[in-house]
Image (cartoon, rainbow, N blue to C red):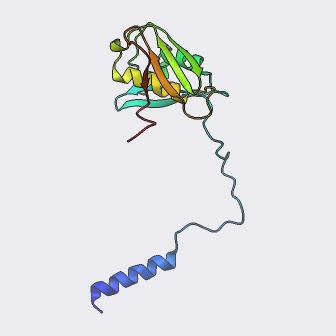
Amino acid sequence: MTIRLRAIAAAALLLTACGCAIPDTAGAVKSGKSATGIESGTRLYFLSPQGIRLTIRPGTEREGLQQTLDTLMAGPTRTEQHTGLGTALPASGKVTAATEDGTVTLRLSWPTSALSPYAIQQLVCTAEDAPATTATAPRIAMVSSDAPGPVFVQCDLHHTG
């Protein structure tokens, strides 16, 4: 056997003898609360230097759909701004949400042509993530003054491919 093969064999034997370095335990080890699903708080999507990003505002319960959209429209808090979050949504205007048959309809008080793709994604991703009366992820329809009918949009972060 060559020196190189001996070194490889010795290294393999050493790694096997050492194990994975995780000590045995006698039963369950307490390490905090167990996972319970979606983190509580209001889930909002703001603009970051890397694009649209989820932020969760702490709270005991998640806000409802309309309240979540109103919170999004109010913009990021000072703390969120200090972490680099901003908004592409207009400073004034309103979004009204209605849910029916698995579809969330967002009625905009401004034309969609006035919104950047980032602003649209902020609205759509937040609406998809907000509690609604649908059991599955809702379809999102946007209605505004410059569209002849509803425009269906989906969150690019939630739907890839």
Tell me, yes or no, if residue 121 can be seen here. yes
Residue at image coords 67%, 28%:
60
As rendered, which of 116 and 2 lies closer to the eye?
Answer: 116
Question: Where does the N terminus fall, quadrant-wise?
Answer: bottom left
Q: What is the x, y in percent for residue 142? A: 45, 18
Using the rendered view, name the quadrant where residue 88 is placed: top left
Residue 19 place in picture, x, y as percent: 52, 74
Where residue 38 appears, as percent x and y from the top left, is: 60, 37
In the rendered image, is residue 85 in sight?
Answer: no
* Furthest residue toward bottom: 1
Residue sitting at x 64%, y 45%: 35
**Residue at 53% of width from left, 18% of height from top?**
69
Q: Specify whether 33 is left or right of 8.
A: right
Q: Does 26 appear above or below 77? A: below
Q: Is 108 or 47 nearer to us in this picture?
A: 108
Number of marks in picture = 0
Q: Position of residue 13 (x, y in %)?
A: 44, 82
| Image side of residue 66 versus residue 87, left or right | right
**43 over 148 or under it: above or below:** below
Quarter of the image with the C terminus is top left
